[in-house]
Each structure stands twice: as C-alpha cells, then as structure tokens.
Image (spheres, rainbow, N blue to C red):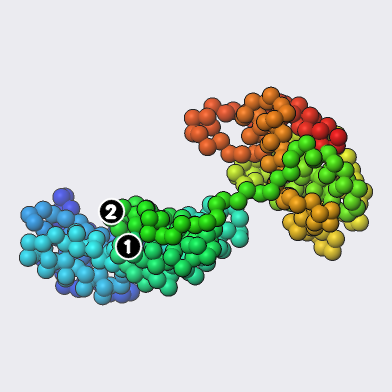
Amino acid sequence: MADDDATPSGKPKGRHPDKKLTAVQVRKAGPGRYADGGGLYLVVDPSGARRWLLRIVAQGKRRDIGLGGVQTVTLADARERAQRLRAIARDGGNPLAERDRDKRASLTFADAARRVHAEQIVPNAKNGKHVAQWLKTLETYAFPVAGAKPVDAVDQADILRILSPIWTETPETARRVRQRLRTVLDWARTAGMRHGINPVEGVEMGLARQKDRTKHFTALPWRELPCVMAKIAATKGMGALALRFAILTAARSGEVRGARWAEIDVEARTWTIPAERMKAGTEHRIPLTDPALDVLRLAKGLATRAEDHVFPAQKAATPLSDMTLSAVLKRHEIAVTVHGFRSTFRDWTEEATAYPFEVKEAALAHAVKNKTERAYRRTDLFEKRREMMQEWGRHVVG
C-alpha cells in the first residue's frame, strides 16, 4: 500500500513495518511510496518506473540512498543491500560511498561498452557497417582482456595488453580500438562509474612506433583530368556514367550511387540529397552543369526498366556497387580511387580559381567544425557554387 500514513513533514508515523512488501506488490503497485521496513521503500513514479530508496541517518545526517531499479535489483537484493548499509551507518561509516563502490563494481567493461553502443552509437551513426564494427572490434580485441573486469578497475596495463598485439600489425584497426576504448571509459567517468584520468591517455608511450600514417585517397593531378575523363566518357555502361557524374558533381561515391530521380530537378538544374544520405546529416544541394545533365539524359536512356535509382544495378532494382565504379578505372589502368577525384577537385579550386574557402568547402559538403562559424553560416552559398561548378564542368570536359 502507498505510504499515506505520513506526517506533514513526510516522516512515517509509528514503527517501520517488518518486510511488509511482497514480490507481487513490487510488480503491480501503482504510483506512490511503499514501506518495507527499516527505512527501505519502493518508489513507483507516475511513469511506472520502479526503484528502491533507503532512508537512514548516517554520520548525524538524514540520507536518502537510491539502491537501483526493480528491473535489476530484486526485493531480496534490496533488503540485503539495505541491511548492509544500515550496519555501516551504525558503525559510523559512510553508506553512500559504499553504495557507489558497489555500483561501480557491478558494472563490467563489457556492460559499459554495450551501453555506450546502444545509447550513443546506434542512435547517431549513419553507417550500418560502422555500427556493427564498433562493438565487434571491442568484442574481438578488448573483451578477452578486460570485458569481465569492473569498469572502474580497468587500468593502463589492460589498455597496453589490448593494443600491443595489433598496434604495429594492423595500425588502423588498433587506432580505432584505442578510440573506442577511450569513448567507453570517458562515458564511465561521466556516469560516475570510475574516477581519475582515462587510462587510454598517454598509452602510446608504452607502445612501439607505428610505421604507417594516415593514407589519403590517391588523387589525379587536376591538369590530367580532361584526358582521363575522355577515356571514361568513351566507356559504355552505367558504371562509367555514374563515375562521370561523381566527378562532375564532386560528390561522394555513395551519394551518387544512391541518387534517385526524385532528388533531381532538371528544370532548376539542382540535385538535392536528403539529410539521411549525407555524411554530415544535413541536406545538401548540388548545382547541375550542362555536362552533368548530359550524363543524366544518357542514364535515363540506358535504363531498361522504370527505376527509382538514377544509376541502377543491371540485375536488380538496387543501386550500383562501389566496385562497379572502381572497375571502370581499373579497365583503363587509371591508378586513382573514385574518392580521390574529390581531392582533384579541391586541388583545382586552390590552384586554378580564386573562390573563397567556404565556397570550396561547401561544394564538398564538408561540415563546419567551428561552432561560431557554424552559427553565423546561414546559407549554403548555392549561387556562388553554381558559378564555380560551371567552371569545373568546362575544365573536366576539356
């Protein structure tokens, strides 16, 4: 029953009942506060959330100590914890500090990693492959070493044991694992599950020096592009058309391969990519030049059936794969990557034009990292970009 027999100050009248609650009451009780005895209460919020509260006097002060929700703490567990904390209070100790130690000890590193993955990575990531790999790398490399340890007990020695075997063998994977370890342990500290400096910080001092460095996508010198574009234009097939369109729009391969006719406005000469398909998560407009519109007309004519996708695969109503575009380059022995053409475009804007930095960056849909600049950026500089892309189109087709 609800704790209705309280004084105006909120203190229950009379003696606390002895183990008044039952498991059925814990599951079914409506909103209110229910006494179990010895200062232990079940609190049911209007939302239906159920949690345990221990009200005791410790070190001369009244303290309300949360013992967790009923989903993870049973009635028997709550009574056992309450009894132990009451004993600590009677001996003059700090039951709140003991409760926090219990809380930290009960959460393992694996538990913390899964919570971070579920609460932060899954809702915010745009790439399904990244979502799966984020947790998989920790399961593969970190969990065997530290997965079962309390998250507050993971130290730098553990981090070294996780990273050492892969630090020089697979440097890129190792750097990703290090970043994910840092994210989990930062979350644990913020959530009050551990204290002190993140043990990932400075761990490089105990690791061998990596030989590789971040590798940029191989790009073509911009002066050579017209000759290469002529070879691509002479190639038949949807893959060659998609590659030409990617070069002419300076868009990412995935954005081009996923393009739909509903995003194309031929009369307005605009391609509008919705936010859910953009890396930065915001809608992006691309001005379409004459050469780009020519590619669209050829793609329309090449389609063998009614399609939503601008560049459909041959055997199914799905977009082309990235390998299809790469195969065009391989066929002509062009030693660059599809993504590298974005770097070619950026080099051209720097060396052959005088457009402002923000116009060049907007054309590549790069996110504005500076918060102040982002607050004042109220336009996508579309008309200036249209002028720049017209120049780019003339250069590309020679």
Q: Secondary structure at mark 2?
A: loop
Q: Which mark is residue 196?
A: 2
The answer, for residue 42, to whether it is visible in the render is no
Q: From the viewer's perspective, is 23 left or right of 97?
A: right
Q: Could you tell me residue 64's position as x and y percent? A: 20, 56
Q: Could you tell me residue 131's position as x and y percent? A: 56, 60
Q: Nearest the camera: 277 or 87?
A: 277
Image quadrant containing the C terminus: top right
Q: Nearer the viewer, mark 2 or mark 1?
A: 1
Which residue corresponds to mark 1? 155
Q: Give the Cα distance between marks 2 and 1.
A: 11 Å
Hey, what amino acid is under mark 1?
A: Asp
Residue visible at 85% across and 48% down in the picture: 232
Q: From the viewer's perspective, is 96 left or right of 375?
A: left
Q: Nearest the camera: 325 or 22?
A: 325
Residue visible at 65% across and 46% down in the picture: 278
